[in-house]
């Protein structure tokens, strides 16, 4: 059997061998700890319970002897011949004055009884008419419980009854029964209520050690003390515990509790003792066992960790490579440290590493091929889009120059010609696909110079661009077509002055450029059709879709143009591009990104 088990263990995988070995060590450690700990706890609890039970038996015996004396006191009071005679006279005497005299005699008799008893807090007799005679402390019996006490005495019909109040007061209650010739009758003469000083009884009879506490409960209320040192919930848990002993846990210290039930009163005596003060040796054994278990656990943990690391370390490195591939950053794979002992190993882990490395090399080759194809496709798309630019503006400009030459013969013609020449050079030279924002604004200024000759004071043009954004890279002929669009659709239909404004601002790592006019604007339905490419524009120049496509091809699909328009108020083209600075020799690298 042993050899078969050994053979089965050897044939298991390394991971299962590790789990089986660690589990076996932990089970042995845990079983050893449980055996020793149960032995310690058993000895500990037995000693605690035996010692506390002895103390409780003695304490409860002495306390109940005093309670029996109080019960005998109530019997002596209700059978006292003078009190019997006085109470009977109260029922037969019609005179109020005489009744008061008799009640005074009853009070004096009660004082005589109470004065000789050290454990009596107060005495109170209630006659058949509900009148009260006091002896001792007049606050001894709360007013709100007196009817309940009278009813309780009637229920016991001459026998002694114990009552525990809401504030922990203990009262002995008995009914006066008329008797003659030493025989009782059923006639009710009144009720006697004696409040017992249970605190003095306990303190005198119980010799408490430092930190020990005695709690007495009748099952529903706490008889002693008036203010228990523990919460009512903790006390109830110990009173209703299935075992005759238990533990009360406090932040500062833990306490051991033991209980017994009195056969005389039915009360439960609960004795609570601090752990550390009485059984320091047991606590020392418990700490020793805990230290031994911790040592065994650490030894098993160290052994299991070393075994686990020898297996999981290669797996972790392979997982790290997989996560790097998942992010798409294959260049970082070369920065990861290589372990020749793993890749050269002939086990399953080494085979996985070698297969994974071959797969990565093939992926790189495929990516390089695909990247070259994408660059070629993007370059072709850019050229195709740029080829759509129709030089119709040249004809409009020549017509304006011709009109100015014939009609005005002004020197402003030279400025128009210069502006036209600059525009022609900028439009024809398509080798520069991305230029600086300053160069793009120069193209716009040349275009506006020519248009001002045509529209004069009707064209109000403004540029609000910070100088620190002048070197921002932007696709060529992005702003000029938008200004041209504003003149066609905002200025030409109007007679009054038209305001066209270009503004730019930097937000984080992005540049926001706005081309805005105060023309007739566009409706929401028209804008939606414009975005979908369903609107046929009047011009033949660079369309809005052309500009948007060039921005996306240059910088990525997250950039482009957003249009805001309010009918009869304004139209604004919001261009969003990354904040990238560079010179003309850096343009090609930006486009190829």
Image (tube, rainbow, N blue to C red):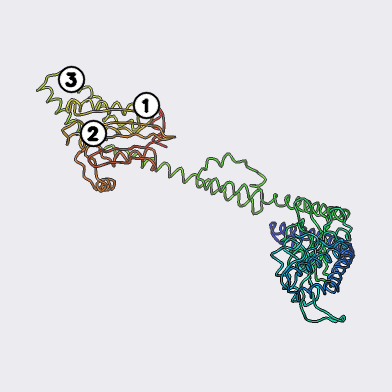
> What is the residue that sits farthest to the top in this orientation?
411
Mark 2, other Cα within 10 Å: few <14 / some 14–19 / many ≥20: many
Residue 542 position (above or below residue 445):
below
Q: Which residue is tagged 2?
A: 484
User: Residue 68: percent from the left, percent from the top?
Assistant: 86, 69
Q: Which residue is tagged 3?
A: 412
Give me the residue at 74% from left, 76% from top. 155
Viewer-nearest of discs 1 and 3:
1
Q: Which residue is tagged 1?
A: 466
User: Residue 200: percent from the left, percent from the top?
Assistant: 85, 59
Front one among 7 and 237: 237
User: Which is more N-terminal, label 3 or label 2?
Assistant: 3
Alpha carbons under labels 2 and 3: distance apart: 21 Å
Dot 1: element: loop
Q: Are marks 1 and 2 in contact (CB under 8 Å)?
A: no
Q: To which quarter of the image does residue 262 belong?
A: bottom right
Mark 3, other Cα within 10 Å: few <14 / some 14–19 / many ≥20: some
Dot 2: element: helix
Viewer-nearest of discs 1 and 2:
1
User: Residue 475: percent from the left, percent from the top?
Assistant: 34, 34
Give me the residue at 82% from left, 71% from top. 265
Image side of residue 523 versus residue 66, left or right: left
Front one among 24 and 232: 232
User: Residue 530: percent from the left, percent from the top?
Assistant: 26, 45
């Amino acid at each position: 059997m042993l050899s078969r088990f050994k053979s089965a263990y050897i044939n298991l995988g390394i991971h299962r061998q590790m789990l089986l070995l660690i589990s076996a060590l932990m089970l042995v450690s845990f079983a050893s700890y449980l055996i020793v700990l149960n032995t310690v706890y058993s000895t500990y609890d037995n000693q605690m319970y035996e010692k506390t039970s002895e103390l409780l038996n003695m304490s409860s015996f002495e306390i109940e002897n005093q309670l029996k004396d109080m019960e005998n006191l109530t019997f002596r009071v209700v059978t006292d011949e003078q009190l019997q005679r006085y109470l009977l006279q109260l029922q037969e005497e019609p005179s109020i004055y005489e009744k008061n005299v008799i009640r005074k005699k009853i009070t004096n008799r009660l004082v005589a009884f109470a004065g000789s008893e050290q454990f009596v807090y107060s005495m109170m007799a209630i006659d058949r008419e509900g009148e009260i005679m006091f002896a001792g402390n007049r606050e001894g019996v709360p007013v709100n419980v007196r009817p309940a006490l009278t009813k309780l005495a009637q229920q016991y019909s001459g026998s002694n009854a114990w009552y525990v109040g809401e504030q922990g007061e203990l009262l002995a209650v008995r009914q006066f029964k008329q008797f003659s010739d030493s025989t009782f009758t059923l006639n009710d003469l009144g009720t006697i209520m004696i409040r017992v000083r249970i605190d003095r009884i306990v303190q005198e009879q119980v010799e408490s050690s430092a930190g020990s506490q005695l709690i007495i409960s009748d099952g529903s209320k706490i008889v002693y003390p008036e203010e228990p040192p523990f919460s009512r919930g903790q006390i109830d848990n110990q009173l209703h515990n299935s075992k005759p002993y238990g533990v009360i846990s406090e932040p500062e210290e833990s306490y051991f509790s033991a209980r017994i039930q009195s056969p005389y009163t039915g009360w439960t005596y609960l004795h609570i003792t601090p752990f550390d003060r009485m059984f320091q040796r047991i606590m020392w054994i418990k700490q020793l066992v805990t230290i031994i278990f911790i040592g065994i656990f650490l030894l098993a943990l160290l052994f299991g960790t070393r075994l686990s690391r020898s297996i999981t370390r290669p797996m972790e490195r392979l997982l790290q490579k997989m996560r790097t591939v998942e992010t798409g950053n294959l260049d970082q794979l070369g920065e990861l440290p290589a372990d020749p002992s793993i890749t050269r190993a002939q086990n399953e882990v080494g085979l996985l590493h070698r297969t994974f490395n071959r797969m990565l090399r093939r992926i790189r080759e495929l990516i390089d091929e695909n990247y070259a194809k994408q660059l070629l496709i993007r370059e072709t798309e850019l050229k195709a889009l740029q080829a759509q630019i129709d030089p119709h503006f040249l004809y409009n400009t020549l017509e304006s120059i011709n009109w100015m030459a014939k009609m005005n013969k002004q020197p402003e013609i030279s400025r128009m010609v210069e502006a036209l020449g600059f525009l022609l050079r900028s439009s024809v030279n398509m080798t520069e696909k991305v230029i600086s924002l300053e160069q793009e604004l120069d193209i716009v200024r040349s275009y506006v110079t020519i248009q001002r000759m045509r529209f004069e004071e009707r064209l109000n043009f403004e540029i609000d661009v910070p100088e620190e954004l002048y070197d921002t890279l932007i696709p060529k002929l992005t702003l000029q077509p938008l200004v041209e669009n504003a003149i066609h659709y905002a200025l030409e239909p109007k007679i009054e002055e038209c305001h066209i404004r270009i503004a730019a601002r930097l937000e984080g790592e992005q540049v926001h450029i706005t081309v805005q006019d105060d023309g007739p604007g566009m409706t929401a339905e028209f804008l939606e059709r414009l975005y979908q490419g369903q609107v046929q524009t009047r011009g033949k120049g660079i369309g809005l879709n052309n500009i948007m496509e060039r921005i996306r091809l240059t910088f990525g699909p997250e950039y482009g143009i957003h249009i805001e328009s309010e009918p009869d108020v304004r139209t604004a083209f919001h261009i969003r591009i990354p904040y990238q600075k560079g010179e003309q020799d850096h343009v090609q690298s930006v486009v190829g990104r």
